[in-house]
Amino acid sequence: MGNWLSQVGALTMLNLRTISQRRGSALSAMVGIAGVVAVFVTVLSIAEGLRATMAATGSPDTVLVMRGGSDSEMMSGLGRDATRLIADAPGVRRAAAGPVSSAELFVVVDLPKKSTGTDANVPLRGVQETSFAVRQRFKIEDGRTFEPGTSEIIVGRGAAAEFSGLAIGQKQRWGQTDWTVVGIFSDGGSLSESEIWCDVGVLQPAYRRGSTFQSVHARLESPADFTRFRDALKGNPQLDVKVQRESDYYAGQSSGMSRMIRILGSVIALLMAGGAVFGALNTMYSTVAARSREIATLRALGFKGSPVILSVMAESMFLALVGGLVGAGIAYFAFNGYRTSTLNWQSFSQVAFAFKVTPLLLVLGTGIALVIGLIGGLFPAWRAAHLPVATALREL
């Protein structure tokens, strides 16, 4: 056993030390594998970033109430009386100013993207003053909040970074009103940072919405009060509503898009991996061919076939590991935190988010590289171990 291990170690170190003599083919294999890993990790980081943004929106003690049968706020509609009944339902947190509940209106406006200049739909949300207490992580980052009853707006930092015309002091005309940006806000990295907020009482006449709203966002006394709150609304004959935790609602919105991105990324990576496998095969076959006499000599000196196989496999896996780490590094340093936006198909508006290259994605990418190295080295290693010793030695 000790002799066998020493043979494996000696052959492996020999192969690794002579990689520089085959730098062209080795570099080609590593670049191909690095490309596969970089693309795979980057594409999946889009889905992870979108999922993280949606997951950061809402909390277990915050609820969203829409009209019964509505799949999104855009499709919902609630009257003023209904929003009051919802705010007064049991389980809603009370503050000195009243229930911590905000009846809101949601429209989309056109703004050009900074990156392309093309127009995109951006959410403009009318909120009540109590909305700032409902969103527990809300914080003004620059400027101030809007004055109630005025046509002032505040902008989420994601929207401010992604779209033009949203700097403090700039004006926009939407609906029948001229709006002035007075502040930039954050909300813990949530979907709200992709939105523009204003006073709902000013937004309603600007878009001729009368006294209607689309949803109610309310904060409960505790997450355990959700069932009591929901049952009270469902049992009220004056209401026809759909009640969800905010976190569940936004997680559901992201699931379809995230799934599609993951499938697309996997398909692209699979196609590229096929090319990388052929590149690794070509590299390792070239290595075996160039060293056929050397391998035959070692076999004639008593080296067994299995150490030869393992040494060739080790070289292939080493090249794959280096390529995988390079590709993972490129994905992390070039794209982690990179901000962009995509269409939310439920609201037909843009969601600003950041790519999120997680440790799990880096591990998966490196694992794919090792699989490519394993497949790419297996057949050349088998050929090396079964080279006709007599034929190869006659070429000496």
Image (cartoon, rainbow, N blue to C red):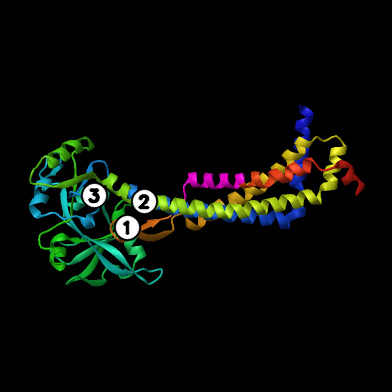
Quarter where residue 163 is shown: bottom left
Q: Which mark is residue 88?
A: none
Asked if residue 329 can be seen in this view, the reply is: no
Q: Position of residue 390 (x, y in %)?
A: 89, 42
Camera-side residue: 52 or 287?
287
Mark 2 is surrounded, within 10 Å at the Cα level, by few (under 14), some (14 to 19) or many (20 or more) other residues, namely few
Question: Mark 3 or mark 2, which is nearer to you?
Answer: 2
Which residue sits at x=59%, y=47%? 369
Contact check, label 2 and label 1, Cβ < 8 Å:
yes
Q: For the residues marked 1 and 3, what is the alpha-carbon distance in whole angstroms?
A: 24 Å
Task: Give the left or right position of residue 309, taking residue 146 as reference.
Answer: right
Q: Earlier in the sequence, mark 1 or mark 3?
A: 3
Task: Give the left or right position of residue 387, taking residue 61 as reference.
Answer: right
Which residue sits at x=19%, y=46%? 242
Label 2 sits on residue: 256
Amino acid type at mark 3: Arg
Label 1 sits on residue: 345
Quarter where residue 160 is shown: bottom left
Label 3 sits on residue: 135
- Segment colored magenta: 356-371
Q: Work out which quarter of the rendered image holds the N terminus and state it.
A: top right
Mark 3 is surrounded, within 10 Å at the Cα level, by few (under 14), some (14 to 19) or many (20 or more) other residues, namely many
Quarter where residue 75 is shown: bottom left
Which residue sits at x=16%, y=61%? 199
Amino acid type at mark 1: Trp
Task: Give the left or right position of residue 317, taking residue 338 as reference.
Answer: right
Asked if residue 232 can be seen in this view, the reply is: yes
Amino acid type at mark 2: Gly
Contact check, label 1 and label 3, Cβ < 8 Å:
no
Q: Is residue 205 above or below residue 310?
A: below
Which residue sits at x=11%, y=47%? 239
Camera-side residue: 180 or 28?
28
